[in-house]
Image (tube, helix red, strand yellow):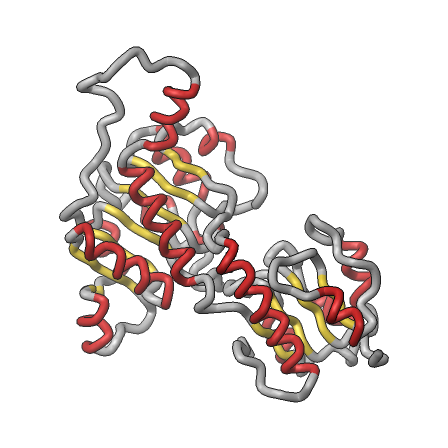
Amino acid sequence: MEDRAIVVTRRLPGVPFDSLARRFRAGAPPPDAPMARGDLLRRVRGASGILCTLADRVDAEVLETAGPSLKAVSNFAVGVNNVDVAEATRRGVRVCNTPEVLTEATADLGFALLLAAARKFSDAERFLREGRWTGWDPWGFLGVPVHGATLGIVGMGKIGAAVAKRSRGFSMRVLYHSRRRLPPEREAEAGASWRGLDDLLAESDFVVLCVPLTAETRGLISRERLSRMKPAAVLVNVARGEVVEEEALASALSAGRLFAAGLDVYEREPVVHPALLSAPSAVLLPHLGSATGEAREAMGRLATENLLAVLEHREPPCPVN
Ligand code: DGY
């Protein structure tokens, strides 16, 4: 066994903890829940690598506690907003993530949320399960049409493009907003036209958020921006909760200033704003974007390969810095 230590913060699909533990000092098997902050700080001391999830805050304190032995932070997620990448870079620590392998699963979920919110799945199912259904109702649970509607995608990375691809089957007109406009051939491939964010919000019947959480995207969908959306529009968030001002969204939904929302992510996970919990027009999922067995196994394999590559002085497959 090598003298180097690693920390795996949680039991994860696709991460062969036992075989890693035969090669590196890895401590006790990781818990089946997020690692407590105190345990994380205790276990990272002198470690060479950390394999973590989005529930672990790998900030300056963790990096400082780990010390100069730390070479790799491998995140079991595509989003790396839980890692202080600037500080890691300053300390010469490679940060890696797991893009691509979860693209299709996340786009599937985004589109499922769009359909579910448009057609009031959650509210209608609740009604049925509560035994309140007394028969077919010509006025019951009237939704908004998806076919032929305008879809606005905010963040046209891989997941955004995969959502656009799904919309073709519904003959949707696709608008997109991202910091940089795509080259014309990529726009044509996605069948999407660029808009400024405010125009996209005003023109779209469905807005799907696919941006990473950064300093620029935190609070991007503010109260003011929500007010630009059509009252019959649907907002879907498969990005990060902090991209939306949750309080403002909750009040727009309760006041009927938006038709519905489909949310997979929240500002203070796992806490969900009480006004969202009580809004019948909100379809709420517990951060399931990448939750297929295939995607999660692939994320684990990639996160392991990222970690091993850095520790073996090879270029990792998915570096962030
Ligand atoms: C990610 O990868 O960033 C998702 O939010 C979790 O799979």
Q: In this orientation, which residue lies closer to the viewer: 175 or 203?
A: 175
Q: Quadrant of the N terminus?
A: bottom right
Residue 265 in the image, given as x and y percentages of width and height: 48, 47
279 sits left or right of 13 in the view: left
- Tell me, yes or no, if residue 22 can be seen here: yes
State whether residue 309 is above or below residue 261. below
Report the quarter where the C terminus lies. Answer: bottom right
Q: Position of residue 210 (x, y in %)?
A: 38, 58
The answer to whether residue 17 is left or right of residue 194 is right
Percent of width and height locating residue 39: 80, 56
* Residue drawn at x 40%, y 36% as measured from the top left: 283
Corner quadrant of residue 314 = bottom right
Residue 90 in view of the camera: no
Indicate whether 70 appears above or below 51.
below
* Outermost residue toward the top in this view: 134
How many numbered discs sit on the rendered protein? 0
At 69% across and 56% down in the image, what residue appears? 11
- The quarter holding residue 49 reads bottom right
Please name whichever residue, 121 or 175, is drawn nearer the observer in this view of the structure.
121
Where is residue 240? Give x, y as percent.
47, 54
Give me the residue at 83% from left, 80% from top: 2
- In this orientation, which residue lies closer to the viewer: 268 or 47? 47
The residue nearer to you, when weighing 194 against 143, is 143
Tell me the residue at 20%/43% (across/down).
Answer: 146
